[in-house]
Amino acid sequence: MNGQIQYGSARPLTFQPTRFRRVPRETDPGRFPDTAAASRPLVLLFGGSLLLGGLLTAAPNDFPGIALAVLLGGCWLSLVLAMTLPRERQLAGQELLRRLALFRHELNAVGNAPSRRELEALVTRAAELGLRDEEVSDELAQIRASADAIDLKERLDRGDLPTAEALDPMPSGNVCHFVCPVRFGRRRSDQFGHLVLTAAWLKFRGPLDVTVAWNEVSTVRRDGREIVVGLQDSRRVLRFSCQSFSEAATGGAIADHLARAGRPEPKNDAPEYRASF
């Protein structure tokens, strides 16, 4: 592995901090008809009836005073309940958030290398939970990327490697198979550039140029939008964060195939005995 560092100024990507405001999630109550939720009018009626019954029981002979107390108490109770009770759209929104969390948990449970059957079951599961495509767009993109990666691995096993246009002139006999923009590193040490996968090596082309031959790579795996590369005889791990699940799935499949093809066969150190007659 060799590296070349080029120094230069970098401009910040944003100038203003991002501000978040917590807003209750709302949706159409008709989407979840089986959700048990008491409506606001029924709660108000129950509260008013309870207050009236308590006052009548406490002072049955003082009806004018009771009427005034009931009027004032009913107004106060209605105001408090109207301000504190969630609306039906908010209750439906809470149910939507619960179902979204359940679906995301099931998606995370299958990991980054699911089978085709597991992916089909997840698509069916989203429909069963009543989730719309725009509500699980990121999750569906991840499912489609995993399905495309399965198809690509089958092509790679048949020897059908894709080709890509290299950023720099390639040495004779070397072929570029994949190029995509990535963020390399972790946290403050992040560098922005391009990940280049060729038949001979993996290369990060950016402010910090890094080249690794495939026989130096021990493992390749995908972690969400990241391609994680482990090195032989080292604890060092290279992380390349892609812009989409599709790029990460494609690049991860190609990198894993090239690493396995470029990995030397294990040597048999046992002595060889020959029989003589």
Image (tube, rainbow, N blue to C red):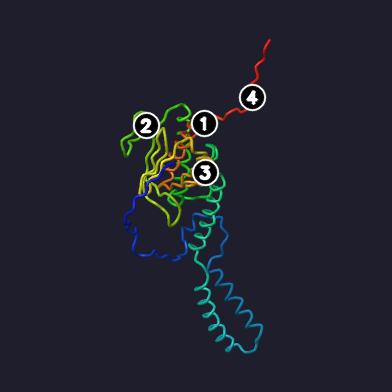
- Disc 3 secondary structure class: loop
Q: Say which amino acid is labelled 4.
A: Pro
- Disc 2 secondary structure class: loop
Query: Depth-wise, is mark 4 or mark 3 nearer the camera?
Result: 4
Ranked by sequence position, the earlier of labels 4 and 3 is: 3
Nearer the observer, 134 or 107: 107
Ranked by sequence position, the earlier of labels 3 and 2 is: 3
Q: Which residue is label 2 attached to?
A: 175
Q: Which residue is label 1 attached to?
A: 264
Ranked by sequence position, the earlier of labels 1 and 4 is: 1
Q: Which residue is label 4 attached to?
A: 271
Ranked by sequence position, the earlier of labels 2 and 4 is: 2
Q: Say which amino acid is labelled 1.
A: Pro
Q: Which disc number belongs to residue 112?
A: 3
- Tell me what residue is drawn at x 56 percent, y 72 percent: 45
Ranked by sequence position, the earlier of labels 1 and 3 is: 3
- Disc 4 secondary structure class: loop
